[in-house]
Image: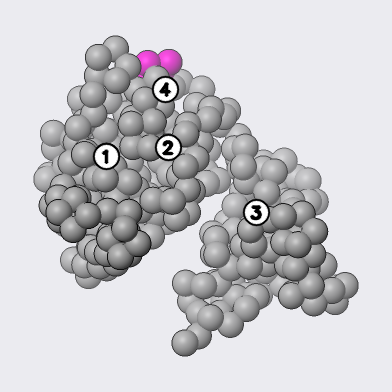
């Protein structure tokens, strides 16, 4: 890796859908992974997600049974932050709440003074804001993975005001080592992908909200007319409407441009618990 540094052990704080996916990608590349959650139940859900994903890879012939077993053994689960000591790098993947993330960064910065980088998987919160909670802002950056992590190849490397060039090099080389393609972006809300994607998705939501076209025709128009693998409303459901709403809020707060403002319908759906595929209902119904 950069400057001869090779990361062989990482810690992931947050075992949700994204954290579990990052753990799988790293473990598949031979990295030892510690996944932290404060509650045992959340850890068991993460373990279950990994098991299902790995078995799916085996059934499709992408992974042998032996390799699958070794991959699973490289991931350990803990409710004890002290167990993360010795990790060479940290990836945070908890809820999109700047205070929650900030307090985690403050604690990890104190506990792991020798970690090569502290990275956030945030899709909207300024990295500089998280770095300000630490005593070593030069080793803080963003590593924004895309869902589902084991499949999607892209990682946005988000460089804050105080991020050291060496930190960027080490993080980029780590991303490449686990099979991802890193691209660099400045520390602005939305980074590259969401800054381009959100106006498109919100235009589709407004179109549906105003009765301009049916949800199916909006989606089919972009799928068949532009060759997109899925339509914008289906993609909203896949991302998670709660996550999308938080990204919209962040983008609008930063740039004050109307194309980033979440439409009223999106807010009503989020507060009603219609968050897309993960809750069984969004723009479409996913109940069994």
Circle 4 packing at 10 Å, graded few (<14), some (14-19), many (20+), is many
Q: Which residue is mark 1?
A: 29
Disc 4 versus disc 3: nearer the observer: 4
Q: Which residues are magenta?
A: 164-168
Q: Residue at x 64, y 62 (%)?
A: 230
- Place of residue 138 in the rendered image (x, y in percent of width and height, measured from the top left): 38, 21
Q: Nearer the viewer, mark 2 or mark 4?
A: 2
Q: How is the image coloured?
A: one colour
Which label number is shown at residue 180? 2
Pick the front one: 227 or 260: 227
Q: Secondary structure at mark 4?
A: helix
Q: Which mark is residue 248?
A: 3
- Which of the two residues, 280 or 273, is positioned nearer the viewer here? 280
Frontmost of labels 2 and 3 is: 2
Can you tell which quarter of the image residue 137 is in?
Answer: top left
Which image quadrant is residue 110 in?
Answer: top left
Q: Mark 2 or mark 3: which comes first in sequence?
A: 2
Instruction: Using residue 189 as the reference point, say whether residue 154 is left or right of it.
Output: left
Query: Is residue 72 found left or right of 205 in the rendered image?
Result: left
**Vertical placement of residue 119 versus 164, above or below:** below
Residue 128 image position (x, y, % from top left) = 49, 31
Q: Which residue is mark 4?
A: 168
Cβ atoms under marks 1 and 3 closer than 8 Å? no
Please report whichever mark, 1 or 3, sits nearer to the chain's N-terminal start.
1
Q: Is residue 131 visible?
A: no
Separation of residues labelled 4 and 3 (CA atoms)? 27 Å
Q: Secondary structure at mark 3?
A: helix
Q: Earlier in the sequence, mark 2 or mark 4?
A: 4
């Amino acid at each position: 890796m950069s400057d001869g540094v090779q990361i062989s052990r990482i810690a992931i704080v947050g075992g949700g859908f994204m954290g579990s996916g990052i753990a799988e990608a790293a473990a598949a590349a031979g990295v030892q992974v510690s996944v932290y959650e404060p509650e045992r139940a959340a850890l068991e859900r993460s373990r279950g997600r990994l098991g299902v994903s790995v078995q799916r890879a085996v059934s499709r012939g992408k992974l042998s049974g032996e390799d699958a077993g070794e991959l699973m053994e490289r991931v350990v689960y803990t409710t004890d932050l002290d167990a993360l000591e010795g990790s060479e790098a940290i990836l945070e993947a908890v809820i999109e709440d700047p205070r929650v993330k900030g307090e985690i960064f403050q604690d990890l910065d104190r506990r792991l003074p020798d970690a090569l980088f502290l990275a956030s998987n945030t899709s909207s919160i300024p990295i500089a804001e998280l770095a300000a909670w630490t005593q070593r802002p030069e080793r803080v950056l963003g590593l924004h993975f895309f869902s589902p992590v084991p499949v999607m190849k892209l990682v946005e490397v988000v460089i804050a005001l105080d991020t050291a060039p060496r930190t960027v090099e080490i993080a980029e080389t780590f991303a490449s080592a686990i099979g991802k393609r890193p691209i660099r972006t400045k520390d602005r809300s939305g980074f590259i992908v969401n800054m381009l994607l959100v106006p498109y998705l919100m235009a589709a939501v407004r179109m549906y909200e105003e009765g301009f076209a049916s949800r199916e025709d909006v989606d089919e128009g972009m799928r068949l007319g532009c060759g997109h693998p899925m339509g914008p409303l289906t993609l909203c459901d896949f991302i998670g409407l709660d996550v999308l709403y938080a990204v919209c809020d962040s983008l609008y707060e930063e740039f004050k441009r109307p194309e980033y403002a979440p439409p009223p319908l999106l807010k009503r759906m989020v507060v009603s618990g219609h968050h897309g595929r993960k809750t069984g209902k969004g723009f479409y119904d996913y109940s069994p």
